[in-house]
Image (spheres, helix red, strand yellow):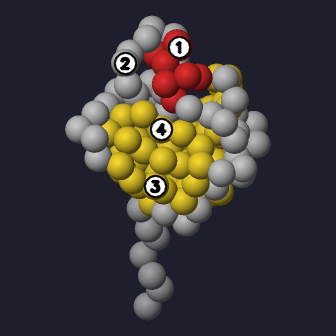
Amino acid sequence: MADAPTTEKKAAVHKKSLQSPDETRPFGKGKLEVVNVGGVTIGRSHHEPGWKWSEHVKPIAKTDRCEVNHVGYVVQGRMKIVGRDGSEEEIQAGDGFVIPPGHDAWTVGNETVILLDFRGSPEYAKQK
């Protein structure tokens, strides 16, 4: 007995290269490359040695601290995060992270930090 023809739709795979971002947002000592794919925004940020949010992004965001919720993965480098409540953490290559709003951050060491951000990119480093 032959199988009945199927009318099921296959799930579509959506892909887009981060090498060709939809938008690039420069900020002092760094940049954010934004890709929109399949209804999701993915950001790849580069933070050079000497980068600090309160020096290089604060003038763009016009807030006292970073008020973006970040969920992502560290591809390269190390970054220090200090929360409004005084909490401190360091993230490094290989770490997944969730960083709540109300923080400052800076590059640690002499290696550029590269992060993939799956949540905060729509708002990050945008003029208010």
Q: Which residue is mark 2?
A: 64
Secondary structure beneath label 2: loop
Is residue 87 at least partly visible in the picture? yes
Q: Nearer the viewer, residue 30 or 34?
A: 30
Q: Nearer the viewer, residue 13 or 24?
A: 24
**Residues at marks 3 and 2, CA–CA distance in whole angstroms:** 21 Å
First in sequence: mark 1 vs mark 3: 1
Q: Amino acid at mark 1?
A: Ile
Residue 18 at what x, y percent from top left?
A: 69, 44
Seen at 55% across and 22% down, the residue is: 55
Q: Nearer the viewer, residue 117 or 30?
A: 30
Seen at 42% across and 75% down, the residue is: 4
Q: Residue furthest right?
A: 19
Quarter of the C terminus within the rendering: top left
Q: Is residue 115 left or right of residue 102?
A: right
First in sequence: mark 4 vs mark 1: 1
First in sequence: mark 3 vs mark 4: 3
Q: Amino acid at mark 3?
A: Glu
Q: Residue furthest left?
A: 85
**Residues at marks 4 and 1, CA–CA distance in whole angstroms:** 15 Å
Q: Amino acid at mark 2?
A: Asp
Q: Amino acid at mark 4?
A: Ala
Q: Which residue is mark 1?
A: 60
Q: Which residue is mark 3?
A: 90
Q: Which residue is mark 4?
A: 105
Residue 54 at what x, y percent from top left?
A: 49, 25
